[in-house]
Image (cartoon, rainbow, N blue to C red):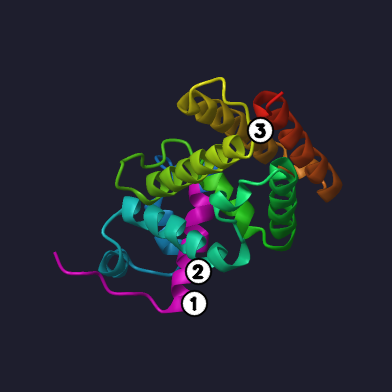
């Protein structure tokens, strides 16, 4: 199958923004592709000239946000965290992410996509690939913490990783549900609380 045509940048950004809002508000299954297309002033035949399906559009939304945030959000190489001040570095990274989210709301849009009901879950989908990247980064960061003596080493690394991910995803899901009630100061307090919880769970004694 040949490659699809590429929308002009401004039209592509408009379509992806509309689709992202629809997916986040209604969930993937209930999101209306017809409504997205009409809202963008496109015909159905024109849409399929650029995207094969609603799944392909969702992947494009994920990839578009990843591309936009790659330069805005600086995530350190996890191996660089193998230092005695591991937890200080983790706290600094958390503060940097909070600062980036306060400046660019698209970081929050990006996190919302992970909680879209019935989002495409295939292993070859964009969201699954991003999740695998996050899992890999976290596993390497925990290994760096163990190497530095800052993270406990009395449990299997895989269990440690799953506990950490469960804590992070749960807190982030709650924070997104209560976003309208949370100002910047409260958001920073919750971010610090998240680090404190992880430190209590993972720090070596």
User: Label 1, on which residue?
Assistant: 10
- Does 125 sit left or right of 191 as displayed? left
- In the image, residue 13 lies in the stretch drawn in magenta: yes
> How far is mark 2 from mark 1, CA to CA?
6 Å
User: Answer yes or no: do the residues labelled 1 and 3 have beta carbons within 8 Å?
Assistant: no
User: At x 72% / y 35%, what residue is drawn?
Assistant: 194
Q: Position of residue 8 (x, y in %)?
A: 41, 79
N-terminal-most mark, 2 or 3: 2
Q: In this view, does 181 lie above or below 59?
A: above
Secondary structure under the numbered disc 3 in the rendered image? helix
Quadrant containing the C terminus is: top right
Mark 2 Cα-neighbour bin, 10 Å: few <14, some 14–19, many ≥20: few
User: Label 3, on which residue?
Assistant: 171
- Does 200 sit left or right of 15 as displayed? right
User: Label 2, on which residue?
Assistant: 14
- Count of marks overlaid on the render: 3
Magenta segment range? 1-23
User: At x 54% / y 26%, what residue is drawn?
Assistant: 160
- Does 17 sit left or right of 88 as displayed? left
Q: In this view, does 123 lie above or below 104?
A: above
Mark 1 Cα-neighbour bin, 10 Å: few <14, some 14–19, many ≥20: few
Q: Position of residue 87 (x, y in %)?
A: 72, 41
User: Which of the pair 29/193 is nearer the observer?
Assistant: 193
């Amino acid at each position: 199958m040949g490659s699809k045509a590429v929308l002009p940048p401004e039209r592509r950004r408009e379509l992806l923004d509309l689709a992202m809002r629809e997916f986040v508000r209604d969930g993937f299954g209930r999101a209306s592709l017809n409504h997205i297309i009409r809202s963008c002033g496109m015909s159905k035949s024109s849409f399929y000239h650029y995207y094969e399906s609603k799944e392909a559009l969702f992947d494009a939304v994920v990839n578009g946000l990843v591309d936009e945030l790659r330069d805005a959000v600086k995530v350190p190489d996890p191996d660089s965290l193998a230092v005695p001040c591991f937890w200080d570095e983790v706290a600094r990274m958390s503060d940097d992410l909070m600062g980036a989210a306060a400046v660019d709301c698209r970081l929050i849009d990006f996190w919302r996509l992970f909680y879209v009901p019935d989002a495409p879950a295939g292993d070859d989908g964009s969201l699954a690939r991003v999740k695998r990247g996050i899992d890999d980064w976290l596993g390497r960061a925990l290994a760096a913490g163990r190497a530095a003596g800052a993270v406990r080493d009395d449990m299997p690394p895989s269990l440690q990783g799953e506990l950490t991910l469960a804590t992070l995803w749960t807190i982030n899901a709650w924070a997104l549900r209560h976003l309208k009630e949370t100002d910047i100061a409260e958001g920073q307090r919750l971010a610090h609380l998240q680090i404190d919880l992880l430190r209590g769970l993972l720090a070596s004694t």
